[in-house]
Image (spheres, rainbow, N blue to C red):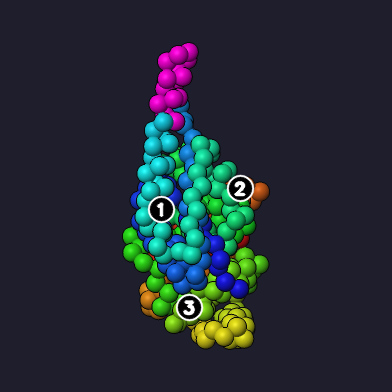
Amino acid sequence: MSYATVMVCLALDQPNEARLEAACGIAERFDAGVVGIAASQFSPPLYFTSGEQAQNLIDQGQAALKSRMAELEAQFFGAAGKRARSVEWRSAIDVPVRYLLQQARCADIIVSGGPSDAFSDPFLRASPKDLVMQAGRPLLVVPDTVTLLDLRSMLVAWKDTPEARRAIVDSLPLLRKAEDVTIAEIVETDDSRPEAISRARDVVAWLSRHGIVARERVPEKNGDRDVAAQLDRIAADVGAGVIVAGAYGHSRFRELVLGGMTQHLITQTARCVLLSH
């Protein structure tokens, strides 16, 4: 298993340098192609008017979007042109998440930025929350503060669920490139630590059969520290550049409402996170 095509989602209203660097880093490591993608749709203001004035406003808005996407296209080719086996650009005047989910079929892995601190405008960007739950592809979330894809140490946030199993399979190509791999399971309230250690060792043994040397780490129960804080501590201890985890949602609205750990991983700004659902 490898990555033959990397898709990188560019945002109209956020920095794109970090995600482009990560996508190109994957392309170089796996001799892969890169598809750059962007979409947006003009959103009329609340005071929207009608008639000829309205049409002029729509025309101006769409022209501004097309101009911005042309800038992103140039930025994409400037970044990826000499670092990927092939480069392709796709863009549309469309709702971003709808367009990106349609195009995800062409990629092995999707690279996205984290959410903006400001209100997330669904007409300007596709939220990583929507992408990870609906794309059917692993999503690498790259914070704007990351300057390169650091694979020296990778941390797998293990939980014995289908999502975590899918995530570790999806991350195998990256794990093979890592110098140090840690499988960490956080013991929660009703769990037994010996059982958690046994599960983590099973994963370590499974990885060894794929030629990957890993070690398990299962800290003692800590009722005073939540799961996210414990995982952050382990990630800092091992110097993880990438965290691998399953993505979880709650209730029948799971496409919109993420579990606490998934929400934390998407919004933290220190490390890249590979998520699968």
Instruction: Examine the structure image and report whether residue 60 is included in the region drawn in magenta.
Output: yes
CA–CA distance in space, label 1 to label 2: 20 Å
Q: Nearer the viewer, residue 49 or 104?
A: 104
Rendering quarter of residue 44: top left
User: Comparing marks 3 and 1, which lies closer to the viewer?
Assistant: 1
The stretch of residues the image draws in magenta is: 48-62
- Can the viewer see residue 227 in this picture? no
Picture layout, residue 169 above or below residue 101: below
x, y percent for residue 239: 38, 76
Label 2 near label 1: C-beta < 8 Å?
Answer: no
In the image, is residue 60 above or below residue 194?
Answer: above
Residue at 51%, 40% in the rendered image: 92
SS under mark 3: helix
Viewer-nearest of discs 1 and 2? 1
Q: Which residue is mark 1?
A: 76
Residue 74, percent across and down? 38, 48
